[in-house]
Amino acid sequence: MTAVLPSLALALLCLLQARAEVPVQPGFNAEKFAGTWHVAAAVSNCSVFLKMKDGMKSSIAAISFTPEGNLAMKLVWPLLDRCQEFELLFQQSGQAGHYVAAQEKRDLCVMETDYSHYAIVHEFQENGPEPSTALQLLTREQDVSPQLLQKFKELIPTVGLTKDMLAILPKSGECQEDQCTKAIR
Ligand SMILES: *[C@@H]1O[C@H](CO)[C@@H](O)[C@H](O)[C@H]1NC(C)=O
């Protein structure tokens, strides 16, 4: 046991260091970040995502904050022929712009945002059979400029992912925020 502890501590340190490398938007302002975003592009090494990504369409993410400063995300995905709604709740961590969902072992960082046009969000998740990393490009408008897409693509290798894991999600127009089947987890 005593021999195991130091290496365990070291392993934990590696993990912490790995996360600390993800930059977070300096001076993150939750109030300005709240509201409706379109998920315009996503890149992930999650095997389920990789299998489905070519058939995926853009979804809507409605972000709000509780009085305690926790982040609530309502996602509306066009799945098969209907709209599915998912709700995720993240607790605030010690650092502004960094949130954790302890039960689902998810970790979310707002890497970069100008609040009015785009945001780049990093997610790390350990709840599946394998840990996975994802980056999402969120935009206020459904249209994405080539410059913004380029900026997003350049960030992909910095988080240990590759461009073949990228999905640029086409507009759907099928799902509005309010007309959904609820599938809250
Ligand atoms: C995804 O990438 C992260 C970071 O590079 C790595 O820790 C994780 O094991 C990878 N997961 C899969 C399923 O490849």
Image (cartoon, rainbow, N blue to C red):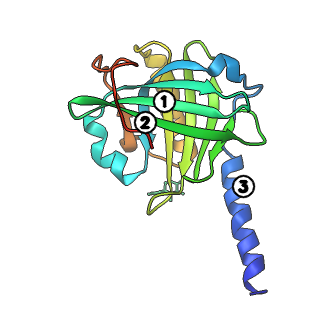
Q: Quadrant of the N terminus?
A: bottom right
User: In this rendering, is residue 155 above or below 15?
Assistant: above
Most foreground residue, 103 or 16: 103
Query: Splitting the image into 4 quarters, where does residue 13 fall?
Result: bottom right
Most foreground residue, 147 or 104: 104
Residue 4 drawn at (x, y percent): 72, 83
Residue 30 drawn at (x, y percent): 69, 24
Most foreground residue, 77 or 55: 77
Dot 3 surroundings within 10 Å: few (below 14), some, or many (20 or more)?
Answer: few
Q: Amino acid at mark 1?
A: Lys
Residue 108 drawn at (x, y percent): 60, 41
Q: Which residue is mark 1?
A: 74
Q: Residue at x 72, y 27 (%)?
A: 67
Q: Which residue is mark 3?
A: 17
Question: Is residue 23 at least partly visible in the picture?
Answer: no
The answer to which of marks 3 and 2 sits earlier in the sequence is: 3
Q: What distance separates the C-alpha of mark 1 from that of mark 3?
A: 30 Å
The answer to the question of whether label 2 and label 1 lie on touching residues, with beta carbons closer than 8 A, is: yes
Q: What distance separates the C-alpha of mark 2 from that of mark 1?
A: 6 Å
Mark 3 vs mark 2: give the one in front: 2
Q: How many marks?
A: 3
